[in-house]
Amino acid sequence: MNRILRLWPFHLCLILAGSAVCAVASRAKPTEATASPYIVTPVAPLATAVPAPGDAGSVQVISQKGRAFQPATATVHLHRWITIKNDDDTVHHAYCSSPDFKYNSGPQDIGSVHNITFHNLGTFEIRCAIHPDMKLVVTVVK
């Protein structure tokens, strides 16, 4: 019985975990060494603003709208990404088949978002397999 009474705060946390983050009740003040492992750090939301042209350090959101990539060019740092959002009224399918970089999004439904990470320096052409006139030129810099 004493064991059940001692563990009631833990059981209460398990019950409440679905609706809120809670820490195990303790008489000691939390310190770095005794802080609860149940603390959750919020994740930053996806960037939605398009950075200034040539700003390779920011996440760049490229819109697919009017059967075109907007903007049609982007500069990104090595090991960073661009985000492509289908703002069009039709399905798209982004791909790149460069010898130094391969990418295939598969079908991109209306409203979907895809990230493309670049691990090679150079200039790469992203195309749409459904709309062959769509072209995005991405330059990857250090």
Image: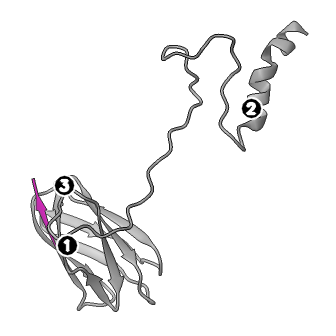
Element on which disc 1 rests:
strand
The residue range painted magenta reads 138-142
On the rendered structure, is 24 left or right of 104?
right
Image coordinates for residue 99, horizontal then vertical, percent? 12, 67
Mark 1 vs mark 2: in front: 2
Image coordinates for residue 127, horizontal then vertical, percent? 24, 81
For mark 2, what is the residue?
14
Q: Residues within 10 Å of mark 1 (few under 14, many from 20)?
A: few
Q: CA distance from mark 1 to mark 2?
A: 49 Å
Mark 3 vs mark 2: in front: 2
* Residue under the image location 47 percent in, 79 percent down: 109
Image coordinates for residue 122, horizontal then vertical, percent? 8, 64
Q: CA distance from mark 3 to mark 2?
A: 42 Å
Kind of residue at badge 3: His
Kind of residue at badge 2: Leu
Mark 3 vs mark 1: in front: 3
Kind of residue at badge 1: Ser
For mark 1, what is the residue?
97
Image coordinates for residue 50, horizontal then vertical, percent? 30, 70
Q: Is residue 49 above or below residue 67?
A: above
Element on which disc 2 rests:
helix
Asked whether 89 falls inside the magenta stretch, the response is no
Mark nearer the N terminus (1 vs 2) = 2
Which quadrant, please, contains the N terminus?
top right
Residue situated in front as seen by the camera: 82 or 126: 82
For mark 3, what is the residue?
119
Q: Is residue 21 above or below residue 75?
A: above
